[in-house]
Image: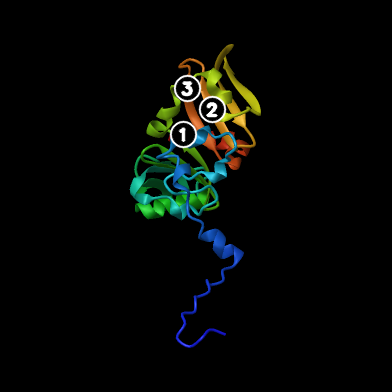
């Protein structure tokens, strides 16, 4: 029993395991927009990185709206026939007519997140969403540049052992190859003509649903 007047240290408040998980702060050194070299650690998985402060598995509502450039859905909701990614506009049917309706940016992001699709943010961070959850990242534009000087023979040292290589052939010519790193949940596309990396994708869902997501990568 403490003596009168003695300071009693406060006990830390108890938190559930779920509470602790939600309070884990991102590691600055694993933020890909500011530390591209973090990707050169072969032991790290896609789910350990952040992109603009967002982790794979986070709610899509965490995607920073102030950096958003465009969004496109994988599946159109009922009544919608077309969606324009370059501005928050969607074509819908009203009274049998094709009508162009402009949405607020918040609603556009909510629509894309709910239906599944991709959201492109500055400076080249593309978030792949499904069921209102961020399921993967694509590094594009300025975020891809730190990797485009790499030579193909540097891949084992920089990215680790490749799980498989999927070649892309057209008209008898090798157009490029997908270097799939299954344990790391990462895909790197090497363009054979340009002799450089033109795409880096992260996330277990991206490997599983790559062909479906690729339809919206360049919207």
What is the spatial separation of the Cα atoms under label 1 and label 2, in whole angstroms?
Answer: 9 Å
Which residue sits at x=60%, y=41%?
A: 204
Is residue 135 or residue 111 the one in the foreground?
135
Secondary structure under the numbered disc 1 in the rendered image:
helix
Q: Is residue 215 visible?
A: no
Residue with the mark numbered 1? 37
The quadrant of the image that shows the N terminus is: bottom right
Circles 3 and 2, Cβ within 8 Å, touching? The answer is yes
Crowding at dot 3, Cα within 10 Å, few <14 / some 14-19 / many 20+, comes out as: some
Residues 37 and 142: in front is 37
Mark earlier in primary sequence (1, 2): 1
Confirm whether residue 11 shows in the render. yes
Q: Position of residue 201 (x, y in %)?
A: 52, 35
Q: Sequence-wise, which precedes: disc 1 or disc 3?
A: 1
Image quadrant where residue 124 sits: top left
Left or right side of 88 for 205: right
Residue at the bottom extreme of this rendering: 4
Residue 106: image quadrant is bottom left
Viewer-proximal residue among 16 and 136: 16
Local SS, label 2: helix
> For mark 3, what is the residue?
150
Q: Position of residue 191 (x, y in %)?
A: 50, 20
Where residue 122 appears, as percent x and y from the top left, is 36, 40
Residue in view at x 60 percent, y 42 percent: 205
Colour mapping: rainbow
Q: Quadrant of residue 209?
A: top right
Determine whether the residue tagged by mark 3 lies in a helix, strand or loop: loop
Name above or below for residue 172 compared with residue 36. Answer: above
From the image, tell me which residue sits under label 2: 158
Query: What residue appears at the point 45 percent right and 27 percent down from the top-left corner?
Result: 147
């Amino acid at each position: 029993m403490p003596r009168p007047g003695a300071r009693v240290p406060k006990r830390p408040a108890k938190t559930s395991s779920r509470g602790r998980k939600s309070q884990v702060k991102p590691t600055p050194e694993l933020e890909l927009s500011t530390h591209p070299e973090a990707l050169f650690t072969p032991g790290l998985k896609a789910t350990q990185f952040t992109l603009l402060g967002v982790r794979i598995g986070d709610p899509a509502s965490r995607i920073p709206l102030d950096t958003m450039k465009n969004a496109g859905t994988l599946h159109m909701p009922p009544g919608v026939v077309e969606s324009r990614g370059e501005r928050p506009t969607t074509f819908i049917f009203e009274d049998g007519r094709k009508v162009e309706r402009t949405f607020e940016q918040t609603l556009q992001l909510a629509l894309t997140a709910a239906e599944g699709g991709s959201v492109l943010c500055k400076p080249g961070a593309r978030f792949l969403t499904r069921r209102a959850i961020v399921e993967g990242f694509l590094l594009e534009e300025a975020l891809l540049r730190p990797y485009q000087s790499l030579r193909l023979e540097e891949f084992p040292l920089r990215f680790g052992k490749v799980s498989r290589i999927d070649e892309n052939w057209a008209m008898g010519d090798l157009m490029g190859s997908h270097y799939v790193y299954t344990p790391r949940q990462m895909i790197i596309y090497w363009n054979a003509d340009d002799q450089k990396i033109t795409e880096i994708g992260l996330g277990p869902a991206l490997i599983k649903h790559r062909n479906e997501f690729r339809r919206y990568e360049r919207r």
